[in-house]
Image: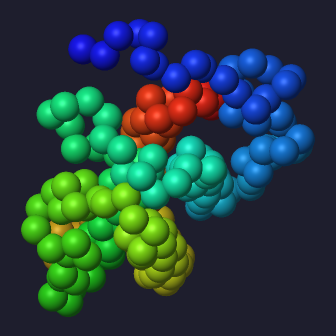
Amino acid sequence: MTPMSDAPARWTRATVYPDMWTDPDKDPRNNEGGGPDGERATLLDFLVNYRLTLRMKCEGLDPEQLARRSVPPSTMSLLGLVRHLAEVERDWRNWITDDEPLPKLYGRRDADFDEATGDRAAVDAAFADLEREQAATDAALDRFDDLGERAGKDRVSVRELMVHRIDEYARHCGHADLLRECVDGRVGQ
């Protein structure tokens, strides 16, 4: 086990609240006033905010830091999370299609984490993959007006898929909190 003296000092950029990632007036997730109207808009608002949180947790780190693993035997890293979420965005589209499934982005199972390497090309490719897959899944879901509509071979409801996406990002943003703190000590929501 690593001695505590080797751990980075905890810190935040926030000056207003010490448990925040950044000050409220600089937080892109800050929604002034009331929340969005309607179920779809509310679900999308939560999804967008979790996506932003993941990106914020990765900001300012170099490729090696993004690829740094948590604790053995885990293969989890911030870069691995980005790659994993690109992979699952693609997989979610498979849930709502009757066509043949799209192939895995990174090949074999767990390659999204196992092969996350700390070089600039790998980092740039992972973020491009995530952006592309998010946009494609968003577009595929936009075709459905009714959140109760069922699609794909397993007849999954659009609502269930949207909630599952929020759940997946929320869980992994929790991982990203801990991973970032281990890398450079930065903390906050």
The answer to whether 144 is drawn above or below residue 48 in the figure is below
At which x and y percent is residue 158? 40, 66
Q: Is residue 184 visible?
A: yes
At which x and y percent is residue 95? 25, 71
Question: Which residue extends farthest top?
Answer: 4
At which x and y percent is residue 36? 75, 53
Residue at image location 45% in from the left, 10% down from the top: 5
Q: For this rendering, which residue is in front, 4 or 124?
A: 4
- Relative placement, left or right, of 34 versus 84 is right
The answer to whether 40 is drawn above or below residue 23 in the figure is below
Q: Is residue 138 visible?
A: no
Residue at image location 22% in from the left, 83% down from the top: 102
The answer to whether 112 is drawn above or below residue 23 in the figure is below
Question: Which residue extends farthest bottom?
Answer: 99
Question: Which residue extends farthest left?
Answer: 108
Residue at image location 22% in from the left, 72% down from the top: 106
- Location of the N terminus by quadrant is top left
Total marks placed = 0
Residue at image location 76% in from the left, 51% down from the top: 28
Q: For this rendering, which residue is in front, 128 or 141?
A: 128
- Relative placement, left or right, of 118 versus 120 is left
Q: For this rendering, which residue is in front, 92 or 105?
A: 105
At which x and y percent is residue 92? 31, 68
Residue 107, by quadrant, is bottom left
- Location of the C terminus by quadrant is top right
